[in-house]
Amino acid sequence: MGGKNLKAIAVERGSRKIAVHNKEELNRSVKQAVKLMVSLSNGMRLYGTSGGVVKCHDLGDFPIKNWQLRSWQKVSNLSGMRLAVTVLKGRYYCGKCPVGCGRVVQVEEGRYKTPVKAGGPEYETMGSLGGNLLIDNIEAVTRANDLCNRYGLDTISVGQVISFAFEAYEKNYVNKNDIGGEFPIIPYL
Ligand code: SF4
């Protein structure tokens, strides 16, 4: 879009009604489909997308230290199950979706306190700002997620850029003069 100089796409909402051949049958089908979706999505409803953190880690699809490592014993500290018993305050739904995988979170006190209840970290954020940086503190990841949202920054990009800088520093491609200070070297556990 940027390359084509496209700034925005505007879509106007329609005002005409959609003709339905058999409204009763449509309603019956919709009810049936919603029931099925709800029964099949219990995990997403309870634990959100980060409910898949441990599973994806086990499959090798979770970033750890800028994708340099294969596994990380602290990964369960970033799971949706862990989130559910720490910072989770509620759920939100996109439109009329019956699943409601969105997390409403808040860190109520301490160093990583967040100002209000807001959207919580998704699976990708747990990966990018968590495992990718070897941070297993779910409150820290929640706060980092909150800050990214406030600044309008994509959490995946932010985590990847930081982990890239960490790795470049550890491998002496850049030094403390290049980056204006020393990076902490985080021990891998
Ligand atoms: S539509 Fe929204 S609430 Fe529903 S499953 Fe997808 S992301 Fe979750």
Image (cartoon, rainbow, N blue to C red):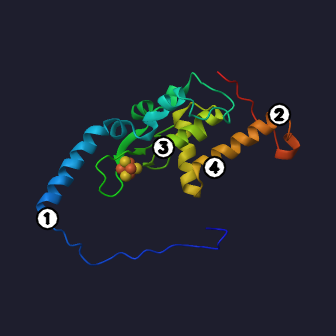
Say which quadrant the N terminus sits in.
bottom right
Please indicate whether residue 25 sits to the left or right of residue 142 in the image.
left
Which of pointers 2 and 1 lies earlier in the amino acid sequence?
Answer: 1
CA gap, disc 2 to disc 4? 21 Å
- Mark 1 or mark 3: which is in front? 1
Q: State which mark lies toward you, 2 or 1.
A: 1
Whether the residues at callouts 2 and 3 have beta carbons within 8 Å, the answer is: no
Q: Position of residue 152 (x, y in %)?
A: 57, 58
SS at mark 3? Answer: loop
Q: Residues within 10 Å of mark 2 (few under 14, many from 20)?
A: few
Secondary structure category for the residue under label 4? helix
- Mark linked to residue 22: 1
Q: Which residue is rendered at x = 40% and y = 39% of the image?
A: 88
Name which residue lies at 40% across and 77% down.
Answer: 12
The quadrant in which the C terminus is found is top right
Q: Position of residue 154 (x, y in %)?
A: 58, 53
- The residue lying toward the viewer, choosing from 183 and 31, is 31
Residue underneath mark 2: 171
Residue 157 is tagged as 4
Q: Which residue is mark 3?
A: 122
Label 2 close to label 4 by CB (< 8 Å)? no
Q: Amino acid at mark 4?
A: Ser
Residue 124 as seen in the image, left or right of residue 19: right
Q: Residue furthest left?
A: 24
Q: Is residue 135 above or below residue 28?
A: above
